[in-house]
Structures are given as C-alpha cells and as structure tokens.
Amino acid sequence: MSTPAPHADHPEYNATVTSIQLVHDDLMILRVEPDGDVPDYEPGQYTTLGLFTDEARVGGMPSAGSRPQKLIRRAYSISCPLLDSAQAVVRPGGSRFLEFYIALVRNDADQPPSLTPRLFALTPGHRLFMGLTPRGHYTLAPVSDTQDVIFVATGTGEAPHNAMIRDLLNRNHQGRIASVVCVRRRRDLGYLPAHLQLEACFENYKYVPITTREPQNLDRSRPDYVGKQYVQELFASGDLERQIGWIPTPGQCHFFLCGNPAMIGAPRRAPDGTLDFPDPKGMVETLTDLGFQLDQPGNPGDIHFEKYW
C-alpha cells in the first residue's frame, strides 16, 4: 500500500494499524498492534475499536453529524490468521497484533454510519483506539474434547469462529467440526482459501460456504440453479447435513450461531416461561425442533449465539 497521509493522533489512541487486506471495497481484514502487550483473550471474545470524528471517511461518504472530537467506539469480534507461511495452522501466542474482519456499512445519507467508513479510510501506520480487555461469554467453554461442533455464521460473523476453529484444531479436538458461512456472493468469503486448506489437512473439519446472490441463486434458467439458500432452511430440509457429511445429535453436538439476527432467531421468554420465537423461523427454533437446547443462565444447553446488531 502507499505511504499513509499525515493524520491527527489523539491521546486516547493506544494502538497502530499494521496491515489492511481489502478482500474487496466493502470488506477488509484489519490487523492492529497495541502500544503495550497484546491482551489475552478467549477465542470467540470481542473488544472495541475507536476513531475520533475528525478522522477522514472513505469515498467521500457523508458525515454522521457527530460533534467534533468525539471518540466513536464499536465492538468487534476478534478473528485471527489461520495459516502460516508454510500453510500449516497457526499456533496461538507470539503475535503482536489482533485481527478483525470488518464490512463497510453503507446506510443512506439520512443515517450515515459513524465508524466503518472511517475504518475503511485507514492505512498502515494510522493510530486508533483499541480496547485492551476482551469480553464476552461466546466461547468454547461448554465444549468437551469429544463433542462435535457446528459453527454457523452470516458474513463477518465468521470472525469469532475463526479463532475458535484454530483453537480446536491446535489442541487436536477429537470431535467433528463444521463451519457453515452464508454470504451474498462468493467474493464475500474473505477466509475461503485458508478454510479449504484446513479442510484438506484435517479429516474432522468441514467448511460449507453458502451464497444467496450468485447467478445460480437467482437465474432459474441455469442448469445449476439452486435458489436463494438460507442456513435455517437448509438445516430444516436436511440438505446441510448431507453437505456436512454427518447428522448432529443433541447432547453430542454444540451449535455456535453468529451474525444476522434473522438467521439466529433468538427467542424472548414469555411470562409463563415459554420461549417466544420470532417470525420468520431462525436457527434457534429450527434446532430446538430437532431436540437441541438453548444455552441459558442456569440452564446449560448446546445452542449458543452472538448477534451482530
């Protein structure tokens, strides 16, 4: 990349951009190095990134109207590199950076997004704020060494799953592992080559990418037409089980769901204690229909979720 243009440094900034990989104009993998030690985190946790309102925005996108000198902070799940230079799974520890997988939010001019247009204007060497205390309970803590795990994500919801998958593979997890990722177009699979390499190296790992806006999803005249594919519908029909290669069993398999709330379909608890599921049907209801249990405080289960908005 070109040498970054001069920019303001605020006292609150405590980290530096070391690398930006643009998957395409609206999707990037960002690496950030803190001024001090890299904070410890459990795979699946998140931290915050922040920039002040006087920072540039990519592509001349309109201002969010925030007052000057305000620090905009948002939470992002921590992703990670999956393969080293020898195409082997990366060992944890020793890294000087944290990695984030970020999509550019493009709302209309009446409600312009605050942070992502500024993040997409960054270049290596730029300063920013990074939270140094990762948080979150969306981790592998409930999973035993021999249980199966299925990760289901939409878009950049894949980020925490990358860290979890790397951790499982590094500790020679004995159960089966599958990662299902639903995106609009195949170009939105920022980690696809790495996952295909992991799939080739580990017999117990399966990566299943699904699209909704490719020609085979939209053009009925094509011989390979499959229609718009949504994860919950594929699970309900049994098609996704066939793609994974095995049938998940309640009590033996944990599901981790991250991304679009419509995919997750998190229920509300009604006054009588029953679960009130949203319409249309999401993954949580689909899985409970199959005998899986939602993980709740005081009532452990095998369905775990992290909503992205």
Image (tube, rainbow, N blue to C red):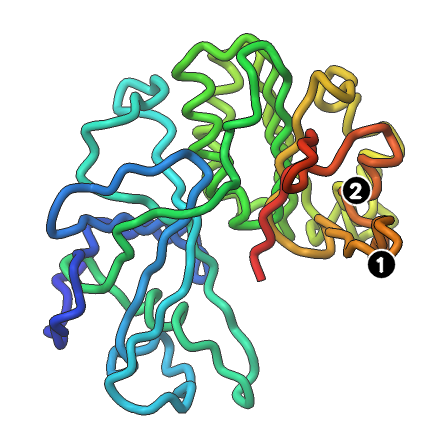
Residue at horizontal 17%, vertical 50%?
34
Residue 114, given in percent of the width and then of the height, sits at: 42, 77
Residue at horizontal 77%, vertical 42%?
284
Q: Name the N-terminal-most of marks 2 and 1.
A: 2
Q: Is residue 26 left or right of residue 295?
A: left
Q: Nearer the viewer, residue 296 or 243?
A: 296
Which residue type carries mark 1?
Pro
Q: In this picture, is 251 found above or below 22?
A: above
The numbered dot on residue 232 is: 2
Residue 98, given in percent of the width and then of the height, sits at: 28, 44
Q: Are there few (<14), some (14-19), or many (20+) residues within 10 Å of tag 2?
A: many
Q: In this picture, is 215 found above or below 242?
A: below
Residue at horizontal 28%, vertical 37%?
40
Residue 11, given in percent of the width and then of the height, sits at: 12, 71
Give the Cα distance between marks 2 and 1: 27 Å
The numbered dot on residue 69 is: none
Residue matched to label 1? 271
The image quadrant that residue 246 belongs to is top right
Which residue type carries mark 2?
Gln
